[in-house]
Image: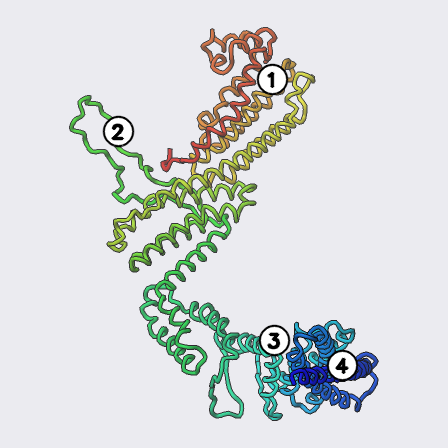
């Protein structure tokens, strides 16, 4: 019995396998035919673009029927595998693999047919204005075409189908966008001169909702909302905030705003909050303590507007950006004041330096009489001394200053006055704003007026005086307001004294640099004077006289632009230093010549006497030239030597005690006696090597002298 059952089951299994072989073979043939039919159909529609209107539905039905039979066969194979797992595993697996391959080909064919149906559906829906259905179909097409699990990309026809999809998508997007712009349209936004902007919403077609929903389906609504919000902000909201506008609604008696969702809010909130804070509230922030006290009603109005935004649902209770801004109104107040003050100071500092006024020392605060030292009861020496201070002690000398410098100081005093009437934290910031103004002056003015300060003597003198004027008042400015500041700050070290040296250094460095510039001009003129060729010609070269007169004219020009501008002691020291460079250069050039003919020496004396006549007139007192031009006596002695005889030279030497001995060495005098002229020995050459470095060294030693200019008239 058992053997019989075994034979029956075996026979049944063989019959079943035979049926499966036959069935699979038939299905594979059908799939192959279907594959070629689909290929021909797709080629006709998407490659050759031949009209096929009926055959596609037949192919779809045939494909669906084959899929049904495939599922039945797959189930039968799975059952047969379980029955004969031990005997026919390999053969059935081969059948199963063949069936799976056929299934893949069938799925690809079915996907191609489905894409074809979607393409027809999109076109029909778009023609019948069913935009939401068309958008959803496009999304289905996109899911099939760009599915990473499919093998569609391996087909040759994939590119053609993808291009068809992109054309459909572009056409649909263009049509829906255009229709939406017709429903929600603007007028006047593209005309720069237009004064009227109109927003019109047309609902006659009743398809606005479908258009918006279809754009949302294809993930393109965000860009439209962003564009709409930007236009709304730029042409509606911003003009209302910043300009005087008239807003009205046509054919409406009641205007109601109701926010049902937040499609627009994310695109609009950031720009709206920035514009309200920067373009609206910051402009009405108070700029004085009095205005700050009257600002409370405005803060309340701002908060009421914010609650309105919450009420209509535009923002939530966690997005109160206006409250966060107005709660710090005290900080905004002082920040706004300090910014405005620094901007005002910057504008003042950029004004022309040549707009000037005359500054004169103020009247004494302690009476008209000069200050005296008290009597010393322990004066054991019984020496009588003048204990009175000079009338000009602690006074800035008379000079010209720029009106901008006076305005800068007046602004600083205004800031300190405001600080005296403010609360503690505000006072500190105002005080340091005042300090920042003087730091700005030391850095901004030299840079802003750099070209003029490098070349124009008058500008240099004005800037020098401005720095000394500000530095002079900074010595006492902090002490002047100390007792007026709030009590909590009176013990702090609120001073400007450290900025005094900074301003003095900037002003004096600028003047010294220009003095160096003027000195280089004169040295350059003398380099073309042909003084080095004195011993090579029998008469003085015309260039020598031309150079001498040009140097004097340059110094007289400085007198014209500096004498009434600089303090007198600074003027004398400045032109004296420049003139000393000229005189020293002349001396070096003359004594460096080995042999000077008598006629040339005579002409040289005549020419040098012109300098002796005109140079003292550059100083307010002719005798001051001896004080400020260190080489002047030596220059005069050189003139005496050039025109003197041997006897006169010996008399002026006077055994090393005369005026010649004070200015020249013994070796130089000896050569003069031997040749009857100014000559140069080997020892005099050592003098030249010393004189030239010393000539340059004087500019280094002069710098610290000018850096700390005296506040007292000499």
In the picture, the disc for residue 210 is none
C-alpha gap between disc 4 and disc 1: 126 Å
The residue indicated by pointer 3 is 193
Crowd class of label 1 (few under 14; some 14 to 19; many from 20; radius 10 Å): some
Tell me which residue sits at (33%, 64%) in the image: 289
Residue 211 in percent (x, y) is at 61, 86
Residues at marks 4 and 2 touching, judged by CB atoms closer than 8 Å:
no
Which type of secondary structure does the marked residue at label 4 adopt? helix
Q: Indicate the quadrant where residue 384 lies.
A: top left
Dot 3 or dot 2: first in sequence order is 3
In the picture, the disc for residue 21 is 4
In the picture, the disc for residue 592 is 1
- Answer yes or no: is residue 525 visible: yes
C-alpha gap between disc 3 and disc 1: 79 Å
Dot 2 or dot 1: first in sequence order is 2
C-alpha gap between disc 4 and disc 2: 139 Å
Which type of secondary structure does the marked residue at label 1 adopt? loop
State the residue lying farthest toward the front.
Answer: 1
Question: Looking at the image, is mark 3 or mark 1 nearer the viewer?
Answer: 3
Residue 239 in percent (x, y) is at 52, 75
C-alpha gap between disc 2 and disc 1: 50 Å
Crowd class of label 4 (few under 14; some 14 to 19; many from 20; radius 10 Å): some
Tell me which residue sits at (34%, 67%) in the image: 292
- Answer yes or no: is residue 146 visible: no
Crowd class of label 3 (few under 14; some 14 to 19; many from 20; radius 10 Å): few
The residue indicated by pointer 2 is 386
Residue 590 in percent (x, y) is at 60, 19
């Amino acid at each position: 019995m058992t053997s019989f059952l075994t034979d029956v089951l075996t026979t049944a299994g063989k019959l079943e396998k035979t049926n499966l072989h036959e069935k699979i073979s038939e299905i594979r043939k059908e799939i192959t035919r279907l594959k070629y039919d689909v290929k021909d159909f797709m080629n006709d529609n998407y490659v050759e673009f031949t009209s096929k209107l009926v055959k596609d539905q037949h192919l779809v039905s045939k494909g669906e029927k084959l899929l049904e039979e495939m599922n039945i066969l797959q189930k039968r194979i799975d059952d047969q595998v379980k029955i004969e797992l031990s005997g026919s595993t390999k053969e059935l697996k081969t059948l199963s693999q063949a069936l799976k391959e056929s299934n893949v080909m069938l799925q690809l064919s079915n996907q191609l047919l489905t894409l074809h149906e979607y393409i027809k559906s999109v076109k029909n829906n778009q023609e019948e204005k069913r935009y939401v259905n068309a958008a959803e179909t496009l999304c289905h097409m996109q899911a099939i075409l760009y599915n990473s699990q499919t093998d569609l990309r391996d087909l040759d026809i994939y590119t053609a189908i993808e291009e068809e999809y992109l054309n459909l998508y572009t056409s649909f997007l263009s049509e829906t966008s255009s229709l939406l712009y017709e429903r929600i349209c603007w007028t006047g936004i593209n005309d720069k001169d237009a004064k009227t902007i109109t927003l019109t919403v047309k609902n006659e077609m009743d398809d606005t909702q479908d258009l918006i929903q279809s754009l949302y389906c294809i993930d393109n609504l965000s860009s439209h909302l962003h564009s709409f919000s930007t236009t709304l902000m730029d042409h509606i909201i911003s003009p209302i905030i910043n300009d005087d506008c008239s807003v009205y609604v046509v054919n409406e008696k009641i205007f109601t705003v109701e926010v049902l969702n937040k499609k627009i809010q994310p695109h609009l909130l950031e720009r709206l909050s920035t514009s309200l804070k920067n373009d609206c509230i910051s402009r009405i922030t108070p700029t004085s303590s009095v205005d700050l006290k009257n600002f409370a009603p405005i803060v309340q109005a701002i908060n009421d507007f914010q609650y309105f935004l919450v009420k209509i649902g535009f923002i939530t209770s966690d997005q109160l950006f206006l409250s966060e801004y107005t709660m710090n109104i005290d900080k905004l107040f002082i920040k706004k004041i300090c910014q405005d003050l620094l901007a005002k100071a910057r504008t003042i500092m950029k004004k022309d330096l040549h707009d000037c006024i005359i500054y004169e020392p103020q009247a004494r605060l302690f009476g008209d009489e000069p200050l005296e030292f008290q009597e010393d009861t322990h004066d054991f020496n019984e020496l009588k001394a003048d204990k009175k201070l000079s009338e000009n002690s602690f006074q800035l000398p008379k000079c010209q200053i720029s009106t901008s410098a006076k305005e800068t100081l007046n602004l600083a005093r205004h800031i300190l006055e405001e600080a005296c009437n403010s609360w503690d934290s505000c006072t500190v910031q105002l005080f340091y704003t005042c300090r920042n103004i003087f730091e700005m002056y030391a850095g901004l003015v030299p840079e802003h007026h750099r070209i003029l300060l490098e070349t124009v003597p008058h500008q240099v003198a004005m800037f020098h005086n401005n720095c000394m004027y500000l530095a002079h008042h900074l010595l006492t400015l902090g002490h002047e307001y100390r007792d007026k500041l709030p009590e909590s700050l009176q013990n702090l070290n609120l001073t400007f004294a450290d900025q005094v040296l900074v301003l003095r250094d900037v002003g004096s460095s600028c003047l010294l640099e220009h003095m160096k510039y003027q000195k280089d001009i004169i040295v350059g003129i003398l380099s073309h004077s042909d003084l080095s060729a004195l011993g090579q010609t029998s008469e003085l070269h015309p260039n020598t006289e031309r150079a001498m007169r040009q140097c004097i004219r340059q110094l007289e020009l400085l007198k014209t632009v500096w004498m009434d501008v600089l303090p007198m002691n600074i003027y004398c020291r400045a032109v004296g230093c420049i003139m000393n460079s000229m005189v020293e250069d002349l001396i070096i050039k003359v004594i460096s010549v080995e042999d000077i003919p008598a006629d040339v020496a005579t002409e040289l004396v005549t020419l040098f006497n012109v300098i002796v006549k005109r140079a003292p007139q550059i100083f307010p007192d002719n005798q001051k030239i001896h004080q400020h031009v260190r080489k002047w006596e030596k220059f005069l002695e050189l003139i005496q030597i050039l025109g003197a005889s041997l006897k006169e030279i010996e008399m002026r030497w006077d055994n090393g005690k005369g005026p010649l001995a004070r200015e020249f060495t013994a070796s130089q005098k000896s050569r003069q006696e031997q040749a009857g002229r100014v000559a140069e020995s080997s020892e005099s050459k050592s003098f030249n090597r010393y004189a030239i470095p010393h000539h340059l060294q004087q500019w280094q030693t002069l710098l610290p002298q000018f850096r700390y200019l005296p506040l007292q008239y000499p």
